Image (cartoon, rainbow, N blue to C red):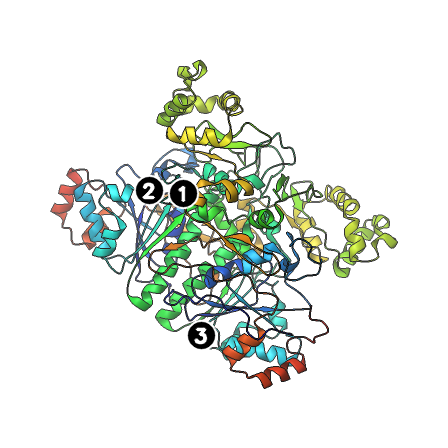
Amino acid sequence: MIDSDPPRPIPLPGTPLDGIRVCDLTWVLAGPQATQILAEFGADVIKVESVRNVDDARMYPPRAEGAAPDDVNASGYHALYNRSKRSIRLDVRNPAGLDLLKRLIAVSDVVVENFSSRVLENWGLTYEEMQRLRPDIIYCSMAGLGHRGRDRDHQTFGPTVQALSGLTYLSGLPGREPAGYGYSYMDNTGGYYAAMAILTAIFHRNRTGQGQYLDLAQVEAAINLTGPAILEAEVNGRPNRRPDLPVGNRSQAGPAAPFGIYPAAGDDRWIAISVLDDEQWLAFRRAIGEPDWAADLGLATAEGRRARQDELDARVAAWTREHDAHAAMHLLQEHGVPAGVVQDAEDLIERDEQHRARGFFEWMDHPVIGRTRYNRPVARLSATPGQIRGRAPLHGEHTRQVLGEVLGLDGAALDALEEQGAFYPTSVAR
Amino acid sequence: MTAPFEGVRVVEIAGDEVAYCGKLFANQGADVVLVEPPGGALARTYGPFADDKPDPNGSLHTWHYHTSKRSAVVDITTPAGRAVLLDLLGSADLLIESQGTGWMERNELACDGLLERFPSLVIGSVTPYGTTGPYANYAATDLTALSMGGLVHQCGYDDHSIPPIRPMGYQAWHTASHHLYIACMLALIGRQATGRGQHAEISMHEAITPTTEFMIPMWETGRNILQRQTGRHAYDFITEPAQFPTRDGYVYMLLKTDDTGWNGLVDWLREHDMAASLEGPQFEDRTLRQEQSAVVMPLMGAFAADWSAEEFYYKAQSIGQPWAMIRTPDEAVRAPHHVDRGFPQQVEHPERGRSYTYAGAPWLASATPYVIRRRAPNLGEHTAEVLTELGYDASRQDALRAMGVIA
């Protein structure tokens, strides 16, 4: 039985998106990342969920301790990216369920989805149909390759979006296979782009009354993040596929050296150091105690240091290896040298003094996952701050609440719809 | 089609972390005035350069990040230059800056004061670590910021004697700019209702830390630290390789074991008389096939070696396997699919008598076009134009120029 009064997201009156309703058909990460941002600045985000094709992220690791493998409410990953939203369960293959989805779209400002490119079309939910339901609707699709173009039917996911855009190619040591990104950077970032596109469209609708169709191809957003490499090939006629590109951890812009990631004391601990100019070189020498080798006049200029980068890197590594990564960073920063530890999750969540001082992580309870920490919204607005509005919803827990509130359906009407299987037959409910 | 920011003026105090945000506004119709110090923004010294010749107007980095903007050289560290900036802000909707903790205050441009004077102004600021806390004055580069924020720890090779690898392309600055754009849009939408501006702040460190997919929940729920692995997800255990060399490059594969994908794969191998190794009861259903991935993937990897990456990618997609080739940026921007979508845009460079292909709209909007209207401005190209619009006559401009306040 679906609880009829589950917790509501904390109201945020006066925030920029208060009063905006989002019909959220997204899953996995890219889409939920976008709607989380909208939710935490005031939008009422209603996540429409399937039972047959459960959001993959609900099954992803990490899992709550002792949770059954098929528990749809036990993923820490899902909980992070879906907080502050409400969840309803609709069977869109059931005519009564599809009808409810259309009625929800008719009272929504934004529809967003990140399915592959023909799914909504197959449900009969083209942009034209949505416009018929709600003339000023803002519809954002975010398939990896978009909804138009000859490769629109290709299936993509984070790593292949990165592969097809050039991002993967640009990560690695020269002359070696790509190292790429060790995660779906373009899922988080694709979500940022959908939020950017939707916010721009809301701004435009407020000025003109006009909605629109936003066809986001995550690969194209990603190509924009490689711009100077494209121009280097275009303007200088030097293709990107060549042995000296990418440049590993060295400077992308010019002769700055030393510039790299160096081993620190301990197992697999590293520190990034960037010496940008001659002044910082002098500061670096002072910080490491003015060793004789660094007084070499040949190293006094950026060009001189660049010409001897390999030698310099070995010298710097010999110093960093003797030091704790955080202690070395503090010492270098005190001397004005940009340095940063290669921090892992434990460093960031348990030890990072900056995140702690600014209260970046917040504890929150979840009935299955328990008490864990979540990062607060990144944008800090002085007059209309956003906030985490509540834990991620259990699968479908707001079905009756939302349909009652938003579509004005009473208990008897909801019972009848449940009987018709609009929220899936109870036999498939988990 | 109307540009979404038609009539919107943005003042951008030149800085690495805000440049991309300003570009997105400019290419969507905003009048973005890039305020540069005498001698030019530091980014004008960033390579690569056109024809490999270092020149303030030849930085390809600057070409990409400052499309459609106007450049005005104003020394805002002087009282006379500040007066010009304040006049400019009187006509602006949005100010974006990344001067660093305390800089605006030291130069009599504290946000509180600016908002008092211009109550409808939206101010967007990026600092490396935020303006409060023990690291508020720490310096950062793209490399150190990506390292501190948690992105770099997940990237690199199976061989851990090699350091973690920072992905190229200034992703720290991009991530700051993405969040800055979101923050500024929220403030601009709020202003449509209230008429009032506000200060929107981004800590680059806080922007990067959650841009890490599994990292936060794997620690919070599982107390797991992810280990970097060549070309695939960092994870708490070692996974199968996913990236394989072809004749001319690399492909990325992740086995899809549903019937469509699997049967497609078997048929494909049958065409090459290699299907025998994928037949038998051990491949009966999805779960069993998944368990065999340590057998299947190396087989497919060896198979890929004789193909071109592009042919392999298209063939795999046609049979229901979601694999991809690893394209370079210059290959990606020209790929026929993106040309179909009108993604690459031609930008005229009158001095060079030709146009060049640039990456175009990051999303296709049916009502609000994204158009690169002109190449990045030369240093100070619009100083006189902007000051004239503000009512500075020729003699006042000459005097300011003689004082070195504008150029």
Helix, strand or loop status at disc 2: loop
Between the C-alphas of marks 1 and 3, the distance is 40 Å
Q: Residue at x 64, y 78 (%)?
A: A422
Q: Earlier in the sequence, mark 2 or mark 1?
A: 2
Q: Residue at x 77, y 60 (%)?
A: B259
Chain ID for label 1? B
Of the numbered discs in the image, which one, if any, rests on residue B69? none
Badge 2 is on which residue? B101
Badge 1 is on which residue? B129
Residue A133 in the image: x percent, y percent?
51, 79
Q: Is residue B175 above or below residue A274?
A: below
Q: Are marks 1 and 3 on the same chain?
A: no
Residue B141 in the image: x percent, y percent?
42, 37
Look at the numbered discs 2 and 1 and tell me whether their residues touch, using CB distance below 8 Å. yes
Q: Quadrant of the N terminus of chain A?
A: bottom right
Q: Mark 3: few, some, or many residues within 10 Å (few <14, many ≥20)?
A: some
Between the C-alphas of marks 2 and 3, the distance is 42 Å
Q: Quadrant of the C terminus of chain A?
A: bottom right
Between the C-alphas of marks 2 and 1, the distance is 9 Å
Residue B3 in the image: x percent, y percent?
37, 63
Helix, strand or loop status at disc 1: loop
Which kind of residue does numbered mark 3 sit on? Asp
Q: Is residue A285 above or below residue A377?
A: above
Q: Nearer the viewer, mark 1 or mark 3?
A: 1
For the question of whether residue B356 can be seen, the reply is: no
Which kind of residue does numbered mark 1 sit on? Tyr
Badge 3 is on which residue? A136
Which kind of residue does numbered mark 2 sit on? Thr
